[in-house]
Amino acid sequence: MTDRLIVIGGVAAGMSAAAKARRTRKDMEIVVYEQTGYISYGSCGFPYVIKGEIPRIQDVIVRTPQDFIKQNIFAHVRHQVLEIDPQQHTLQVRNLETGAEFTDHWDRLILSTGGSATRPPIPGLDLPGIFTLRNVEDTIAIHDWIARQRPQRGVIVGGGYIGLEMAEALAAHGIQLTLVEMLPQVMGNMDADMAAHVQEELVRQHVDLRLEHGVEAFVGNGRVREVVAAGQHFPADIVIFSVGVKPAATLARAAGIALGPTGAVAVDDHQRTNVEQIWAAGDVAEALDLVTGKPTYVPLGTTANKQGRVAGENAAGGDAAFKGIVSTAVVKVFDCEAARTGLSERHARAEGLDIETVTATANSRAHYMPDHQSLHVKLVFERGSQRLLGAQMVGGEGVAKRIDVIAAALHAHWTTYDLAELDLSYAPPFAPVWDPILVAANLANR
């Protein structure tokens, strides 16, 4: 009898898993249930669709259910899985268009339900004009609201990646912006001294930045009109609410699938859960932090796609492993690039590590080249051994690929001495003879 694989969730991890399972086994039945109306899309492109830099939402949709049928993979959109029965190997599914419910059977199951936007119980959060940004429908709704309502004033709640990218997106429509953040800095996963450069760019772009402003209420009559934060009232015709992502693990928890210390599903290096014949991948699952050796939760598409491939191959009888991550990420904030990998100084100290840090500022190109810009590099390393633990970079150009060098060094467990010996490319239009990475490494080695 042919094995039946069901994948719950059809975005990055889910469709990567389904496609890899099909390549691994041609005879397996593969069915995907996705709660929204779309599968296989690049969610990181959403702010640029809203901005208008990407002309159509279809441009970030990679493949449709019809495309997957050609691979004999059957993806059902607008189908919500209500319950998993690990003993009977069944699912309870609701067709969200008809309301009909039915039971399906699985031999192997991959859980890729993703993450969901954090929504604390703040009065007025459900008012029209307040948006989170997680899926295609959210993107369309924000785009349409801007087109129809022509908002003049906007408030962004949260200074993480999505909030910062959406500041640029809304500003492109001439919307006067306020960004409120309850922490004393934006980009909470970076150190305050590096986040300060990002904050300077926001102010330079005329964003009214309000730090240590916790939101208390949203006020409106039929639609949002203002945001109340730290006792102050900020007018708003549109609000982007982006205060974090949490794993969508309710279904897993109810089925007896173990969650880890981060609140996401605990998995081993083969993406197996504690329940036999059930794997998990993507924003619902933990990953191993290669620097600390502990589970971590970093919901990014890069990790989701890799974990999905591993889960799909193993669910189809393969033997693949996912070794872990170093939490590399980059964000564009107007004319500024900010990136990080590994541990921040704050995180490293919280881990009880004996550390040192250095911060270097160098040119992105040779100093005599037009348009060269300052690039700030911070290295975090272990005192004595000089073991590299992490890095952060902020600058006007050249940040994204330089952070990848540090990420590779972290995967290889390098020291700052190793880093300083790198033979990096040099030509005046691209880098100075002493690259900012080498400048920082040499400073650390003194």
Image (cartoon, rainbow, N blue to C red):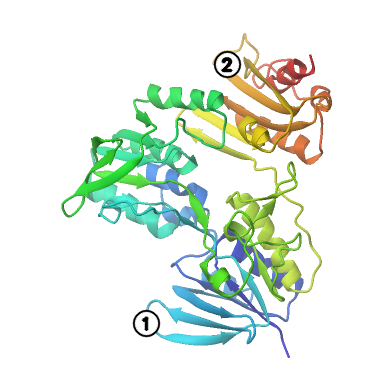
Circle on res. 368:
none
Relative height, residue 371 to residue 134 (above, below): above
- Residue 51 in view: yes
- Residue at the farthest front position: 352
At horizontal 53% and vertical 53% (from top left) the residue drawn is 42
x, y percentage for residue 322? Answer: 75, 56
User: The residue under label 1 is which amino acid type?
Assistant: Thr
CB of mark 2 within 8 Å of CB of mark 1?
Answer: no
Residue located beneath label 2 in the image: 372
* Residue 417 drawn above or below residue 133: above
Q: CA distance from mark 2 to mark 1?
A: 58 Å
User: Which image quarter is the C terminus in?
Assistant: top right
| Mark 1: secondary structure | loop
Quarter-of-image position of residue 440: top right
Residue found farthest to the bottom: 1
Local crowd at mark 2 within 10 Å, few (<14), some, or many (≥20)? many
Q: Quadrant of the N terminus?
A: bottom right
The residue at which mark 1 appears reads as 98
- Quick check: 113 above or below 366? below
Please give the name of the residue rendered at 36% of the width and 55% of the height, measured from the top-left corner.
Answer: 140
Pick the residue in front: 121 or 95: 121
Q: Quadrant of residue 367?
A: top right
Can you tell which of label 2 and label 1 is closer to the viewer?
A: 1
Q: Looking at the image, is mark 2 or mark 1 earlier in the sequence? A: 1
Residue 396 visible? The answer is: no
Q: Is residue 224 toward the left or the right of residue 58 in the image?
A: left
Which residue is painted at 66% across and 32% down in the image?
Answer: 349
Instruction: Give me the residue at 77% from left, 41% from top.
Output: 411
Report helix, strand or loop for mark 2: loop
Where residue 135 sits in the image (x, y, percent)?
45, 57
